Image (cartoon, rainbow, N blue to C red):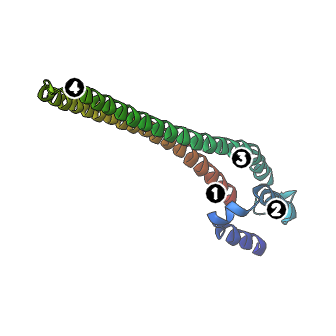
Amino acid sequence: MIEQQSVTRSVSSFTREQANTVDIIKELDKLEELVEDSPQIGGRALWVNADRFFVCTNRIRAFLPEEMKRASRISRDSEKMLQEAQDEVHQTLESARREAERIIEQARARAAELTATDAVRLKAEQEAARIIAEAREQATQIRRGADQYAKEVLAGLDAFLGRILGTVQRGRAKLEQQELESSVR
């Protein structure tokens, strides 16, 4: 009984930070040894139902590696998607900037052509101003479109990462619940 109380205190003082550094499989082995070494009456531990305990530990062993693989895969996929989204947003913004510069340069070139002769100088300046204004408006629209696209990509990524976080949190909660149920038994 003293040994059981000691184990209960040590399990309850076990922190989440320590769980990150502890080999879970080894801890499960230690728990099995604890049951095997506990005082028994009629082949059963006094404080723990050994059959149920071993079923739980085996289920945890079978379940945990797949969850760890899935969490790792989700993490890698999320990082890859985030990087791809950031790259795509950057490329879209860069493409929009280059297109805006090209349009403005064409407008300036056209304005220069129109101002070449004195007879049409005033008209050329007005036309150049109109072309430049249109080019600036097009550039603004392209930038707005690129910004909107970036917002949509990031919103989609945010929703996806939210679902991933929910999956990870539910997995962790399930593992913590199983751990709590195992410690109660």
Q: Find the distance from the CA under tag 4 to the CA under tag 3.
A: 74 Å
First of labels 2, 4 by sequence position: 2
The residue singled out by tag 2 in the image is 30
Q: Left or right of 129: which side holds 27?
A: right
SS type, badge 2 = helix
Whichever of labels 4 and 1 marks the residue nearer the N terminus, that label is 4
Which residue is denoted by mark 4 in the rendering? Answer: 114
Q: Which of pointers 3 and 1 lies earlier in the amino acid sequence?
A: 3
Residue 7: horizontal and vertical position, in percent? 74, 69
Judging depth in this view, the residue of 60 and 165 nearest the camera is 165
Which numbered mark, 1 or 2, is in the foreground of this view? 2
The mark that comes first in sequence, 2 or 3, is: 2
Mark 2 vs mark 4: give the one in front. 4
- Identify the element where label 3 is drawn: helix
Q: CA distance from mark 3 to mark 1?
A: 15 Å
Q: Closer to the camera: disc 4 or disc 3? A: 4
Label number found at residue 64: 3
Where is residue 128 drawn, in percent x and y? 20, 29
Quadrant housing residue 185 = bottom right
Callout 4: helix, strand or loop? helix
| Three-letter amino acid code at the position of disc 3 | Leu
Q: Amino acid under label 1? A: Leu
